[in-house]
Amino acid sequence: MSIVDAEIANVRTFPPNARPNYDQNNPIWKLVKVLEAAVLQADREHYLPETLQHLFGLESLALLGPSGDDRDKKNPRQQDVKEDFQKQNLYDFILTGTEVTRGFARAGDWVGSFLRIAYVPRSPLVGADGVFPGDSVRLYLKVGQDETGSNYLIVPYSMDSARYEIELWAYPGRDLAAQLGPRGKDAVARGALVSRPDLVHGEFSDFVGVPFDDARAAAARSAGQGVDMMARAPNHTMHPVRTLRLELAWTDAGATKWDNANGSNYVYEFSMAMRGWGSYFAIGDSQNPHGGVGGLEYRNLYSNYFGHEGQRRRELGAQWTPELGRVLRNWQFDADHNKPSEKSREDFFAVDYMDLHILKRAAIIGMHRHRDNQEVFLLMEGRGLMVMGDWEKFPSRDRAVELRIMKPGDLSLVKPGQFHALVNLLDENLLLFMFGGYD
């Protein structure tokens, strides 16, 4: 990870005793409007709304500066006063115009994965007038290990969203249009909704329902433990634990001009760390737990124990870092509050605070980041929209912001260098347990 130094000049400062007006032009409302404008191709009843996960490419952002006497310290490397929360908050952001949505869709008796990709053309595809001269754009796409190659996707223009958009469904048959309503049939006819089980994989029953329950029971009988979620359907587009990595590059009909990150392709990842009752490493039963009576069922969400980190290390190789740890930079405090630290990384999560929050109806925890610390949001009651994005630039992916629905029992782990927010979606209180540390 690295700080985007060009954005230090964007930091918005306020004089002493002046407080930003968060009730006007709040960036969370800007992001919610972008989300509300996202248009799916088929009729509403063909989607499982609480499974939808959204990703928006992030071009740049502006933070707020520290308060009080430290107001001129725009460089995050020098912002060492941890009690000054103003410097953590986002002031504004600009998106790239690339949007990706994944989730589960329904066609007849089939329920499986889909992927929506939308794009606003940029230089060098657009002319001097800022307009792309075409009713469709070509897309090179790689989803995990599967790619289009030179058989680029033809992405048509959508009048509804003023974007070039396509939806790829994992539906295995050739009769997709026959399973859809009027809107979906029209999208299939326009080429905006296509069946591509070679690129998008997986059905809902792979991780939910009777087939999965049977697999879990079989694993318990044969191995005495639960299903290994990392090993189950590893190329599933909606895998509950694995990161989904996408590579994209856009071109014109003749492949003469490319918007492709200077030849390296744009790389986006659905990587929000959210775990819960349906997304975990392993599940099992423990009889007489800790010398007690009876039994309990457990789910491993994050763990430095057992074989979870060993499995991640084998798969990620040199890129591996512990999920509950962090890499230390010389401008960060370590868990013992030393700066600079003698350690290059910490393979554990040091907790400095635990809080219970009641988020009132229509209330929002705003978009903010932490320079040093990790934080965990555990939703106990209600429904929330969790927002997580990249404040710093990660070497393995382009910056983006992700949005997902949180339900009771869901747990989100926010790493250093990620900004985040939580929106109360219901007309009732939301109950949240939060803990974190390092700063």
Image (cartoon, helix red, strand yellow):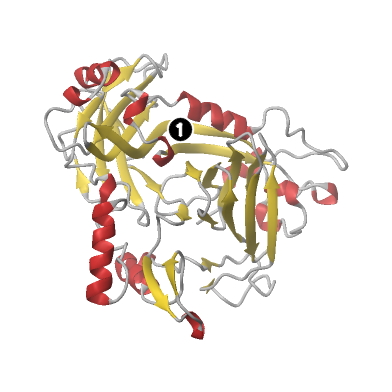
Q: Residue at image x 49%, y 38%?
A: 58
**Where does the image place residue 134, in percent across and percent down from the top left?**
28, 15
- Classify mark 1: helix, strand or loop: strand
**Where does the image place residue 278, in percent across and percent down from the top left?**
40, 55
Q: Quadrant of residue 230?
A: bottom left
Looking at the rendered structure, the kind of residue marked 1 is Thr
Q: How many marks?
A: 1
Q: Residue at image x 58%, y 36%?
A: 425
Residue at the far bottom in the pictured view:
291
Is residue 436 in view from this perspective?
yes
**Where does the image place residue 400, in percent across and percent down from the top left?**
47, 42
Q: Quadrant of residue 267?
A: top left
Q: As rendered, which of 362 and 59 lies closer to the eye?
A: 362
Horizontally, is 371 left or right of 73 in the view?
A: left
Is residue 154 in view from this perspective?
no
Residue at the far right in the pictured view:
17
**Where does the image place residue 302, in percent across and percent down from the top left?**
46, 66
Q: Using the image, determine if residue 413 lies above or below residue 269.
A: below
Horizontally, is 401 left or right of 227 in the view?
A: right
Image quarter hosting the C terminus: bottom right
According to the image, label 1 marks what residue?
A: 96
Residue at the far front in the pictured view:
294
Count neighbours of disc 1 (C-alpha within 10 A) and say few if under 14, some if 14 to 19, many if 20 or more: some
Q: As rendered, which of 83 and 394 lies closer to the eye?
A: 83
